[in-house]
Amino acid sequence: QIYAQGDTGLFSFSPGQTHGDSVTQTEGPVTLSEEESLIINCTYSTTGSPTLFWYVQYPGEGLQLLLKGVRDKEKTSHKGFEAILQKNSKTFHLEKSSVQASDSAVYYCAMI
């Protein structure tokens, strides 16, 4: 079983313009079997031009940067994970087509 934990204890920081900025992602654990596909939703709200991030925290380890989205509609990928920053719909969903046991972790979406 794969446990992908979404966590809403996220940070949103935009110097000089913090009012109304927020990040929301899939809450709670997502349980999958190996080789199933994973998606963790991330939506944001801001009046600025944001940079979005996905961080991962494996058991017993610190936060690691997984993906970074800067340009609209540009796909970013790393270790089989991918995300596309969609500025029209204000989303940066994390996806992986075939998860493995080693993907069990807590995943955080963040914005600056």
Image: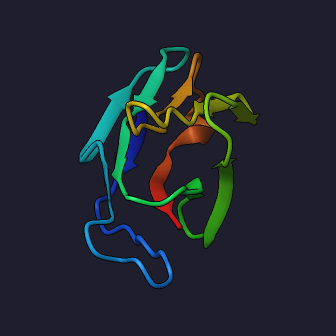
x and y percentages locating residue 112 in the rendered image = 53, 67
**Image side of residue 10 versus residue 69, left or right:** left
Query: Which image quarter: residue 31?
Result: top left
**Image side of residue 103 versus residue 4, left or right:** right
Figure check: 75 above or below 28:
above
Query: Which image quarter: residue 22?
Result: bottom left
**Residue drawn at 25 percent across, 67 percent down:** 20
Query: Which image quarter: residue 60?
Result: bottom right
Figure check: 22 above or below 6:
below
x and y percentages locating residue 8 in the rendered image = 28, 60
24, 56: nearer the viewer = 24
Residue 54 in sight in this render: no
Quadrant of the image for the N terminus?
top left
x and y percentages locating residue 111 in the rendered image = 49, 61
**Residue drawn at 55 percent across, 15 percent down:** 35
Residue 49 in sight in this render: yes
26, 2: nearer the viewer = 26
Q: How many marks?
A: 0
**Residue drawn at 48 percent across, 15 percent down:** 36
x and y percentages locating residue 28 in the rendered image = 24, 47
**Residue drawn at 37 percent across, 58 percent down:** 46
